Amino acid sequence: MDTREVIETYYDSVNRGDWDTWLTLFKDDVAIDEQLAGHVEGIEILRGAIDVMKRGYSKFENVPRHVVVEGDEATVVSHISAANAAGEPIEADVANYFRLEDGKIAYMANFHDTVPFQPFTSQDLG
Amino acid sequence: MAKPEDITVEDKANQFDRIFASTDPVEIANKAIIARYVYATNILEVEVFDRFVIPDYVDHDPTPGQEPGLEGLKKAYHTFLEPFPDVLFVFEDIIAEGDLVFGRGVISGTHQGEFFGIPPTGKRVHWTGTRLFRLEDLMVTEGWINLDFLGLLQQMGAVPAPPAPPPPDTPPPHITGAPATREETKAIMQRLVDEFWNEGNMDVADELFHPQASSPSAPGLPLGPEGVKQIGQMFRTAFPDYWIRIDLIAGEDDRVAARFTQGGTHEGDLFGIPPTGKTAEWTEMGILRIADGKIVESWYDVDMAGLMQQLGVGGDGGAEQPVGAEAGAEA
């Protein structure tokens, strides 16, 4: 897949809850700077995050509003409409930056405000 | 111009429409980082700076007494938080090219604590500022700022306000038109600097400015080239050897922003201040909005406090610190 196809598959799989497909998009040694989780490395971290996503969100939609692709880089500005496990709504604008190597996501960073995600972060997920 | 008190926390710096204006993945990410930065300042979530500011961050316009690096940057926000507990930073525009991101903002707050020796006045004040950041690998490495610090001191009654024409009863027209390229917008800024300001060719304003161009930074001036000429003639009369240079510049297809250094010898009247014979050098940031190849709107944040300090003039309102040292609001 080229960069645009990877990005389209990323959002399509997230919005379908198809986490198995989502995981195939990343390199094994992917590095991620995530606003809530901080700097993480390795696909196993992502595999573990899927469970948190499934338990922490009763709804999760991440709809791209603007996609810019240039070579192996892409930035997507999107809007998240979600709800925590108890159904409390979350609405937020997010920017995701991607850098690919060999057709897979090697680095990803996201930028968003923290307050809109408090219904998610304040949960006790055990 | 938006009233700061009307802007909610959610609105602060979420300039996503302006973020879209870029067509480069890294530029868009850089803008999003700065939007995130401003949001974090408003909820004093300064520990999150670790995610996008390098430890050896260089502040070119530090608050007086500001410690170096990232830790100094975090602490600098308290400089404003104590005198203005409800301080609010709002970006009204954001412009990026390459590794540079300019943000034009309005800062507001209620003066409830001592501020550089000025006792609390209880006044609700607001002032403008333009921030500039350089980023490398999605991390902020350097920062600059120009604030209307003199305007802030005037609102607090610490220095007298110079006479100024009142703003018009009706707002200026919002002019729209075809965009240009970023190279074209930068060329317009360069001509303004070279021909109008450095060569003193006032007539070039007729070519560069729309007949109804306005400047929210100087709402009392006549619209169009006439207002620009008044400012140009005033400064060139006050400083006959006036010069200005562009230090850093970023262009988009309908905006161009620059950081300037300028100077001259004070040999003529300036805002009623008689000539001092002193040589001064001060900084500024300016943003032009371009439509159909003409400047239709412009914003300026000038270190007038620094200029006044170098000229040895100003009020005796109790400002004990070197107020001209580009006291930074870090937004």
Image: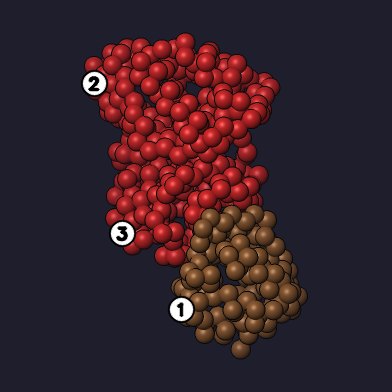
Chain colours: A brown, B red
* Type of amino acid under label 1: Asp
Disc 2 is placed on an element classified as: loop
Looking at the image, is mark 2 or mark 3 earlier in the sequence?
A: 3
Q: In this rendering, would B112 be left or right of A47?
A: left
> Do the residues indicated by labels 2 and 3 lie within the same chain of the protein?
yes
Residue annotated with mark 3: B56
Residue B136 visible in image: yes
Chain name for mark 2: B
Residue annotated with mark 1: A29
Q: Is residue A57 above or below residue B203?
A: below
Tell me the residue at 46%/73% (across/down): A31
Tell me the residue at 62%/82% (across/down): A50
**Quadrant hosting residue B222:** top right
* Type of amino acid under label 2: Lys
Q: In this rendering, would B222 be left or right of A59?
A: left
Q: Residues within 10 Å of mark 2 (few under 14, many from 20)?
A: few
Residue extending furthest bottom? Answer: A126
* Type of amino acid under label 3: Asp
Give residue B278's mark: 2
Give residue A107's mark: none
